[in-house]
Amino acid sequence: MSMFLSLAFAATVALASTTQRAPITADIVAAFERGDYAGASQAASAAAERCTAAPLPAPDHCLDLLNAAATLAGQAGDNAASERHARRALAVADAATPAGHPDRATARNNLALALSNLGRSDEAEPLYRAALALYEAALPPGHSLIAGALSNLAGALLDVGRDAEAEPLFRRALAMTEAAAGPTHPTVAVILNNLAASLEAQGRTAEAEPLLRRSLTIRTVALPSGHPEIAVATANLAGNLQARGLNAEAATLYRQALAMQEAALPAGHPAIATGAANLAATLRALGRFAEAEPLYRRALDIRERALPSGHRDIASAYEGLAAVLSDQHRIAEAEPFYRRVVALRAALPPGHPDRALALANLGANLQAQGRLTDAEPLLRAALAIQEKTFRPTHPARAATIGNLAVVLHGQGKSGEAEELFRRALALREAALGESHPLVATSAANLAGNLMGQGKRAEAITLFRRAWHLSSVWPDAAHPDRILANWSLAEALVRDQPASPEARTLLRAAGDGIRNRVSAHPGFDAAASAELRRYAPVFRAQVQSAWTLSTR
């Protein structure tokens, strides 16, 4: 999913001012334009402090500098300083300008930006609405500040899961900005990105891709090479590709984005954490779990140092680390991280999609540990939220339905589980297309359920489909390819113990396992665990070879 980008307003609106305000100096502007947000923030904060410490020729003399300090601190990742400067700017604007003046709107917008970056979107929304109303009353229709306020309000709605409400606001902002500034203006790139994020949140990833490519093109032309905003645009396009199963291409783009961020930003900047987490997620999808884990840990460390406790991005970092531990079958080790996510997201509104995701992930973790009666109510609660907030074919619903089906199957409720497995498969086909790798997972799950009920012919057809779809992974060591080979082989030998095809499939699975184990540095504990987990494949290989040799 794309990262939402707020439109920051560093300076106030120069309307009918009778005094000369302290200027935003050339060194601040130059640092900002070359992407040195830390340097620009430091210079603006210092200038604002000097200004407010001196005798003032007018009450609003330092207002532009305070607003610049607020927005640049946010760009540099220091959101606490951003809020502090923004509150000072708001106090000055309300005391020094007449009611209805646009400067009051700008100050409210900038405080809302800071609160949004701190994860306090519920506090930001009324400020964005107040800023929009002030701008619309004071400025001509189509003014750039009205467009920016629309986009930022839409972003606040997106943050709290109100994706469908956000989309028309982004579209209005885009139309205004294109009409006023032209189709290649840098602000158009920001709004294109945000509109894409709202579409992706609704599961409409294919519609979002051309918007993200256009946003990246605008930034690449308008900004110097290596600029942080080019990194963001690159990462957002990668996220779209990843959501559509194009993980190898996504990983390449994520590496480029992270390299740009590391070169342009200070080491502890939250954007680097986002870049590391994004790359880790794609490596997970490619089955490269040992490479992904340290990236997730790096993202979590940066976020815990840079962000306030309880911030949604810290919850996301716990979630990513827990997921990659689960991938490595360290299920019990992952559980406390999932529980922290549930606790952090309990502060969200009851129907927020992120609460559903937290419950669903903990439920899936407990299911993997065999604690089925503990997992079922969590998965049902998550699904109840998703059925109210997501469109019927949203991919997140398919994952929760599939996990609930696994729980019911494990409890011996095969018929009820079959119905849910079929729903999950149909949802993924509708949302992702029939050739997406996640469709293979749903097909294999349904096949396993049918095999247990003695419906072997349909089960084998589905196992073959999953095996065919798994070929999207070029690496034979990918866990999904190993599992697809193994599952189809097991299904075949039930009907024909001396199956040459099954022997070939088991040999391919064994080769993939050996490649996975050899990728570990030395024969460490993780390699040993992988080998033990796949031991039944090698036993089946021996049995298949013996059966074929004695028939």
Image (cartoon, grey):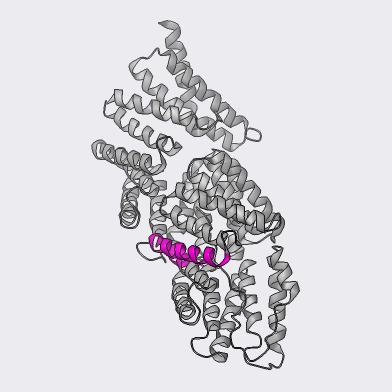
Q: Which residue is drawn at 72% across and 78% down?
A: 46
259 versus 40 height, above or below: above
* x, y percent for residue 59: 62, 92
441 versus 316 height, above or below: above
User: In the image shown, does 510 or 426 lie closer to the viewer?
Assistant: 426
Q: Which residue lies furthest to the left in this view?
A: 415
Q: Residue at x 53, y 63 (%)?
A: 178
The quarter of the picture where residue 457 lies is top left
* x, y percent for residue 379: 34, 50
Q: Residue at x 49, y 47 (%)?
A: 323
The quarter of the image holding the C terminus is: top left
* x, y percent for residue 132: 47, 76
The quarter of the picture where residue 401 lies is top left
Q: Can I make out residue 275 in this image?
A: no
Q: Residue at x 58, y 45 (%)?
A: 292
User: In the image shown, does 32 or 175 lie closer to the viewer?
Assistant: 175
Left or right of 376, for residue 528: right
| Magenta-drawn stretch, dominant element (helix, strand or loop) | helix
Left or right of 208, for residue 79: right
* x, y percent for residue 105: 51, 80
* Span of residues in magenta: 154-181
| Residue 145 among those drawn in magenta | no
User: In the image shown, does 184 or 499 lie closer to the viewer?
Assistant: 184
